[in-house]
Every structure is written in structure tokens, then in C-alpha cells.
Amino acid sequence: MNTTLNKGLKLLLLAAALLALPGCWNRKELNELSIATAFGFDARGDRYRVSVQLVNAGEIADKQGGGGRVPVVTVQQATGNTLFESIRALTTTTPRKIYSSHLRILVIGEDLARAGIAKLLDGLSRDHELRTDFYIIVARERTASEILQVLTPLEKIPTDKMFSSLQASQRNWGITARVDLHQLIYDLVDKGKDPVLAGIVIEGNENIGGTDANLQTVRPPATLKYHGLAVFRKDKLVGWLDDEQSKGYNYIRGSLKSTIVRLPCPKGGELAVELIRTSHRIKGKIRDGKPEIDVRLNAEGNIGEVECAMNLNTPRAIPRLEKELSDAIEESMEATIARAKDYKSDIFGFGAAIHRADFRTWSRLKDRWDEEFVHLPVHVTVNAKIRRTGSVVESFLERMEDS
Amino acid sequence: MIEKGKINARQFSILTLLFSLGSAILIVPSALTAAAMQDGWISAIVGVAAGIPLLAFYNALGSRHPDLTLIEYTERLLGKWVGKIVGLLFFSFFLLLSALVLRNVGDFITTIVMPETPIESVHFILLIAIAMGVGLGLEVIARSAEIFLPWVLMLLFFLIVFLFPQIEMDRIQPVFESGVKTIVRGSLSVISIPYLELVVFLMIYPYVGKPDRRGAAMIKGALIGGTVLVLITMLCVFVLGWDFTSRHTFPSYTLAKKIQVGEFLQRIEVLVAIIWFLTIFFKLVLCFYASLLGLAQLLKMNSYRPLIVPCAMIVLMVSIVVYPNIVYFRIFASEIWPFYALTTGFLLPLLVWAASLISSTGDTASKSRPPA
Amino acid sequence: MVWIVLAAAACVVRFEYVRLYRRKQFKDLSISACLLGFAATLFILRSAHVPIPDPLDWIGAVYKPASKFILSALS
């Protein structure tokens, strides 16, 4: 073959390869997509109602003089017998096909959570467009679709607010839990741990929440707020943990990065310690054929705020505060364990710890673990250290009282 | 000699390495954890350990006839009829393997990346590349393997390093829960994919320079490949958990999906999928090349070139027909393939080796005395 | 699909076979032509929706008993 024919063939081959590269059958043109940022699942009788928060792409782009007249997101709903069916039924109302790869939040209505969430999750884990990195939360006393309809003043897309608020509150306050699909399925499958999901409520008037009016005042009439943790037994919601107990849960799981602990002062009043580091250890043991758990927590904190007249300059002040801090954290953890035992739900993974320690005993216990868990002795040891007191050592309050 | 190319020992190890990573890295972690739960990595180590003596055996066989390929000396040793039949069995193994590997890639792309694309199109386009590769000859294949190796290694390195923060040591415990029997059962999948398939390399043996270095090169490549497999399986258990790994069709891809460094290095799993494409490509090219060369030698042709397009068409057809759905494949790969691969990859070569010992017409043996 | 494959077959005939014929390599030519014919027939059959047998079925049939035996011994 002569070289021009050769070159021609090579060029043809290259062109053919270029044709194949973007994919003929699977092409997704950007203007054919509706990007879904959040899904909401509710129970409607024995069917599912799916709501989806879609980004209104034209409105998201930066415009002069925001405060738009058109909402930045839209929520569509559809009902069906199975999850997949409901999502497809959405196409009857949405103008384009939904693209779910950017999903950030999944809200499950409380009713549906009480009925059981395992069935919904299979469809989600199979879909190739979905990833496992979105967070799952439970709508408390509301339906998921109501949660998705609240507009937020600081973030254009409410889902972003839900997402970053969850991350920030778990890192800095410790009363929520970031659970993604991977973690949730892992907990559901593991007989030694029951799942826990963060709960979200609407504070204020939700009727205005979905309208422009929510964005027009400095203090919005309706806000989304995270409140408590949902406790599940197997895949059904059985109860809620309040703020203190949620902290206890996060202490035990070691997912607390930083939080504030209030301690009473010897002469009345309170002071607050800011924890900056925790490291945890859950160890299972078998003693005389019976399971036991040791939870150990090492915490480090700084004094954040002193609201009482206490002299911190003495050598005994800090160790005493450290002891109080350890006790306070221990109490928190024990209260949470007691509450979880009330619900007969091993949300801490103690069963998994027993499994790791001795799998033979575990295979005996695992089928009645929710009963065994109630009688499980748990020893909590906390070792807290206070390192620094902030920029000030002695509080001026003490001087103030003196003079 | 139909093939005039020569490759060196280093290229030989690289080819072995890429071959052993090939489709194994996609399928094997799932099979390992399905059998042995969180002890899947132990099964992998057992499998690799069993593979090494197997490779030593291949080396022993190949060294007895250093200038002939497997099919050539099979025919010579076992006689015209038996030899040709056994040779045909080898050829059909290589061809079927090519079709299966091609189907692996096709399944991967249509499951993960482009589900609405008909699988035949993916196969067809890949086959064009394979046909070109085979047409250009063994030397070119080996040289391109040398070029692509750094990319594969670099991406593997990134995969492992970026996933470090997500490792949870708890997930591998309790260790040895499954017991020895189950661990051995799991190791069958590693032995059959890829070690028993390495019999393909006996077709390339004669073209590697320095005959005494061939065995070491092959074992080196396979050992490194096996180590990577063990590492990836361990990583799957550490990061995903054994349950997830066993349920997913392509757990190493799910592993890559989890890479998240800060806020900017995420969703790069398709880049990591490049590892899979490259390694499977080389496995496929080598299997197809071995089958073409084998058939040409069986039928005493002048060159294997005229066979390229017809055999490619046959491979295309077989790859589409070969299993109707993914469930069939998983059952086949875990229950039947190990035994078929054992027959063609071990028992038949054993037969050939025995024949070689008996007739002592091994070229190295017959140098000093006349044939018996 | 069939059409692309048949087109590829036609290309082969045009380029390779002419070359082989000229070099008088009749044996290679005939073997290749047989295989090509076989493959083309398969494709034509498939496009006519004739079910093509699956080699894995045959292998499965042969190895099933051994598989059952060994795997149950290892459970």
C-alpha cells in the first residue's frame, strides 16, 4: 500500500475512534439533564412517594441583583409501587431526565422510616449513576417532601446547606451523624450494629418556607435544623436520641472531633471546655462465656469559657476540672447506652466488637443479640486532659467579684 | 518459525505482570470474599503461593524444548493424531479465553460506564485494536507493554495511597473466621484466574532471549501481579468491607469510587479504570496471539496473518454468545472454570511433560546422545 | 452488526487474499477462507435470530460432576 493510502486509513481510524469516544448510545447532553441534588422518600399508604429537588440551572448562574423571583430549585413528586417505578414516574412531571450522580442528600420521611428502609436501599445501591457518598437523614414529624421545599437564605441550593450543615455540626458540635449509603448498608447487614441517622426538622412556619418570603427577611420564617439522632432497630425507626445522648453516641463511636462540655464550678456557675481531640477504643471481651464491653475514650480540651468566679491558677484547679470533665463525658456516654438499651438497639457496634473478639461466641449470640444487648455490661473509662485555657488564664470575673 | 520477533527477559516479565493483573483484578476480589468473607486476602495469598510451583512446572516444560512453542512440541511428542487433538484442545482454550476476556471488558464498560451501548460495538472496536496489535507482531506488543507499564503502576500506586485514609482496620477482623477449608476453596479462584491461564506463555517461550532467564522472568512478573492482587483484595476488605466486595460485580471499581482527597480529588474513578483497560488489553492480545500462532502451527501454515480477521470474527461471535447474563458468568467462573482451566492448564501440560520425559527427545537432553 | 462484519470480510478478501493468491500460498488461503466462511455464516445465522450454541454450556456439562464433588468436599 502506498503511503497516502496508509495515511488516509490512519486518519479514518482516528476519526472512527473519536466517534466512539464520547459514546453514541450513552451520550448525555448537558441541556437534556435535570440535575437532582436531593431525593425525598415518603410512605403513601403502601406505596412510595418520591420527591426530588432539581436545580434550576438558569437561575443558579450568577446574575446581577439576586433575590430572584424564580426559585432556584424545584421539587417534583411522583408516587409508585416500588422505588424505581416512582423515580421513573417522575418523568411525567420533570421536563428532562433526572441525572442523579450529583445527589448529596437523601431525606426519608419518619413514617417510611418507621415502616422499614431496607427495601428502598437496594434500588439505590444497584443504580450505576448513584454513588455512595450522599448523606441520609430522617425528616422528623414531617414528610420528606416538606423538608425539600424549604428555601435557604445563605445557600442558593438548600441541599448544599443541608449537606454542609451536617458536616459542620458533626465535626464541631457532635449531635448529628454523617451517614452515607455505604455506611448505612454496612450497618444494616452487620448484625452487630444497628443504624443511626440524623434527624432534621423545620423550625418555624413551613408554609412560608417554600416561598420567596423566606428569603426576604433578615430572620427567615422557616429554617431547616438538625435535631437529634434517629435510632433504628434492624431497619425500622424506633426512637430518637436527644442532644446530650447524641453527643454520647458520638463519643462512643469516636466520631466527635470537637464540642463544648459544660461543667459546674465549685462555687456555683458553669464553665465550658472545648474538646479538640478524642480517640476512642471499643473492645469486646468474653468472660465466663458472657460478653462484656470496654469503652475507652481519651479526650483533650481547652477551657473555652469561664462563667464563674474560679481561680484557675492553682495547681489543683485543672486536675479537678479534668476529673469533672471525665465524669461528665462518662455520664453522657452511659446515659446514651441506657437509652439504646431501652430501644433494644445496639447502635454502637458492640456486637461487632464481640464478633471481632471471639467469633465462636458471637455465632451463638448473634441471632438474639437485641436481647443480649440489654444485659450487656459496658465499662466506660474516660481520660480527659485540659491543656490550655485560651488567651486568658484567670477569668476577669473572679477579679470582678473580689472588688 | 512463523514468528521472527525476539523479546527480552524484562519485556517477558512485564507481559506476565500485565497478564496476571488483567481480568483477575476485576473479578477475583468478589469471588474471594464471597467464599472466605473477610479472610479473602488470605485465600489470595494461598492462591499466589500455589501459583509459584505451577509456574516452575511451566518453566521446566518450556525449558525442555527451548526453541519450540507448546503446540509444536505437543505434536512432536504425542504423535500426529493425538498431538494434533491435544493441540486443538489448547487452541480452543486460548480462543475461548480470548472471548471470555473480551466479554469481561465489554461487561465492565456496559455495566459501569455506558449501559445503553450494545456490547457488540464495544467488542468490535476493541477487536480492531487487538487485530492491529497482533498483526504487528510479538515485538511490538512487548514494546507497547513497556510503554504502558509506568502508567499502570502509577495509577495503582495512587489508588492504594489515596485510599489510605479510608482504611478501617476493624473490617478485616476477626481473622481466620472462615477456617482452612473455605480459605482453600476461595484460593481456587486465584489459582484459576490467572495462574492456570499463564500456560498461554508457553507459546511465547521460544521467542524470549536468554533461555535460562525465562523462568525467573515469568515468576517475577507473576509474583508481582499476585502481590498486587492480594493488596487490592485487602484494600477492598479494609475500605469496603467483605460484604460489599462480594456483592458488587466489579469491586475494584467501587473501590476507586471511594477516593476522596480533600475536596478536589474525587470522582476520578474512570481514570483508575484505565488500569483495568490496559491490563485486560494485554491479556487479550496475548491470548489471541497464542491462539493464532497455535492454529497456524497446527495446520503448518506459512504465517498466521490470514487467520487474524476470521478468528477475530469468531472471537467476537463467541464473546457475545458465551453467557446470557452476569449471574451465569459468576456461577461459571467460580464453579466450572477452575476445573476446566486445571485440565487444560495443568493436566494436559503434565501429559506433554511426561511424554517428553519418556521419549527423552528434549532438545537439551539430546545434545550429547542420539535420540532413543 | 452483520453488515459491518460482512464489510470487514469483504475487505479481507480484497486485500489479503489477493496477496496470498499472488504468492501462491494456497494452503493459507484455503484455511483462512474456510474460517472466514464459518464466521460469516455464524453472523448471518445470528442476524436471522437462529440460536447459536454456547461453548460454556458444553464445558459446564463435562465438568459439573467433578465440580460438585470437589466443592462439596471443601465446604
Image (spheres, rainbow, N blue to C red):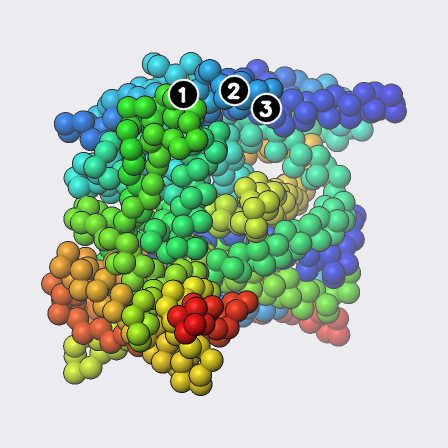
Give the image quarter of residue B370: bottom right
Q: Residues within 10 Å of mark 1 (few under 14, many from 20)?
A: some
Whether residue A242 is visible here, answered yes or no, is yes
**Residue type beneath disc 1:** Asp
Circle on res. B311: none
Which secondary structure, mark 1? loop
Q: Along the polypeptide, which appears first: circle 3 or circle 1?
A: 3
Using the numbered discs, state the Cα–Cα distance from disc 3 to disc 1 in whole angstroms: 18 Å
Circle on res. A212: 1
Towards the viewer: B326 or A394: A394
Residue linked to disc 3: A62
Residue linked to disc 2: A59
Whether residue A119 is visible here, answered yes or no, is no
Q: Seen in the image, is A292 located left or right of residue C7? A: left
Give the image quarter of residue A112: top left
Q: Seen in the image, is C29 located left or right of residue A237? A: right
Tag nearer the camera, 1 or 2: 1
Towards the viewer: A338 or C57: A338
